[in-house]
Image: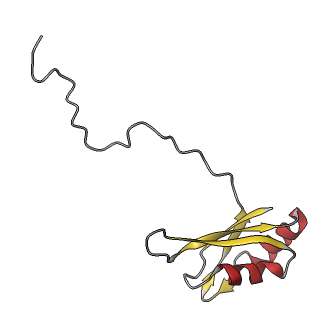
Amino acid sequence: MNIYVSNLSFNTNDAELNELFSAFGTVSSAKVITDKESGRSRGFGFVEMASEDEGKAAMLGLNNKEVEGRAMSVSVAREREERSSGGSRGGYSNNRGGGGGNRW
């Protein structure tokens, strides 16, 4: 079962996240998401539990649990949405829709 954990302390690392969840069963993986440039925690992560029962127990036991002064939010992770690879993001466009000022 894949679990989303948010509102983590920025000091929490992968090993600490693993330790918190291992009290409820076998942790297949625990990953705190970090900023690509600074390497600093982004305050959320993902935990993969070996079974759904263990995952549910961990969610019940750890949701709103205070760790380092912050109440964690623990829920089932949703599938990552596809990002479109093309198209406009909005903003300024230099396309003025004409042929260089020619009038028809």
User: Does 62 sit above or below residue 69?
Assistant: above
Res 92 → quadrant = top left
Left or right placement of residue 62 versus residue 66 in this view: right
Q: Is residue 37 shown left or right of residue 77? A: left
Estimate the x, y position of residue 60 in percent, counting from the top left: 80, 73
User: For the view shown, which residue lies furthest in the bottom direction?
Assistant: 68
| Residue visible at 41% across and 36% down in the picture | 87
Quadrant assignment for the C terminus: top left
- Identify the image quadrant of the N terminus: bottom right
Left or right, 83 with reference to 58 = left
Q: Is residue 70 left or right of residue 91?
A: right
Q: Total label count? A: 0
Q: Nearer the viewer, residue 49 or 57?
A: 49
Residue 3 in the image: state x and y as whole percent. Answer: 73, 65
Q: In percent of the image, x 9 and y 17: which residue is there?
A: 102
The one of 78 and 86 positioned closer to us in this rendering: 86
Quadrant in the picture for residue 91: top left
Res. 59 image quadrant: bottom right
Q: Measuring 60% from the left and 71% from the top, which residue is drawn there? A: 44
Task: Identify which residue, 50 or 8, lies in the foreground.
Answer: 50
Display colour scheme: secondary structure
Q: Position of residue 16 (x, y in %)?
A: 69, 84
- Residue placed furthest toward the top: 104
Q: Position of residue 30 (x, y in %)?
A: 71, 72
With respect to residue 42, does 83 lie above or below? Answer: above
